[in-house]
Image (cartoon, grey):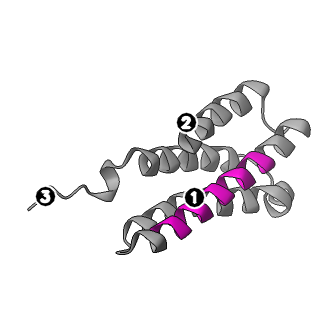
Amino acid sequence: MGNYISLGEIEPYKTAVNVSQKCWKIYEKMDWQLKKIISDQLIRAIDSVGANIAEGYGRFHYLDRIKFYYNARGSLFEVKHWLFLLKERQKITEEKFNELLKDLEILHK
């Protein structure tokens, strides 16, 4: 019998959770209006990345898994969009934007 790899040991999942925690720290500092307009969607999207990786990992058939991994990739692009808007509107620093973008590029690969 082969070794079982737990979800928490999978690098893409760990990276997604890490980026989600970083986004949450940004979210907490924003006023209610900005949360309503952009940040709620950012959090929903970044949490969806990890959730879809987890759900795909839990599926039996590889075609089922792939569908969820595609969903995770789509949410990853949505996260990049919201971060870009936050940077353009000067709600996060260029440094924070680049840090998160670097993490997302690693996750994308």
- Quarter-wise, where is residue 46 in the image? bottom right
Is residue 57 a member of the stretch shown in magenta?
no
Q: Which type of secondary structure does the marked residue at label 1 adopt?
A: helix
Residue that sits furthest to the front in the current view: 63
**In the figure, is residue 108 to the left or right of 60?**
right
Q: Which residue is mark 1?
A: 49
Front position in the image: 41 or 105: 105
Residue at x 80% of width, y 53% of height:
31
Q: In front: mark 1 or mark 3?
A: 3
Q: Which type of secondary structure does the marked residue at label 2 adopt?
A: helix
**In the figure, is residue 32 to the left or right of 52?**
right
Q: Which type of secondary structure does the marked residue at label 3 adopt?
A: loop
Main SS of residues in magenta = helix
Is residue 70 a member of the stretch shown in magenta?
yes
Q: Residues within 10 Å of mark 3 (few under 14, many from 20)?
A: few
Front position in the image: 31 or 88: 88
Q: Which residues are magenta?
A: 65-82
Which comes sooner in the sequence, label 3 or label 2?
Answer: 3
- Quarter-wise, where is residue 88 in the image? top right
Amino acid under disc 2? Ile
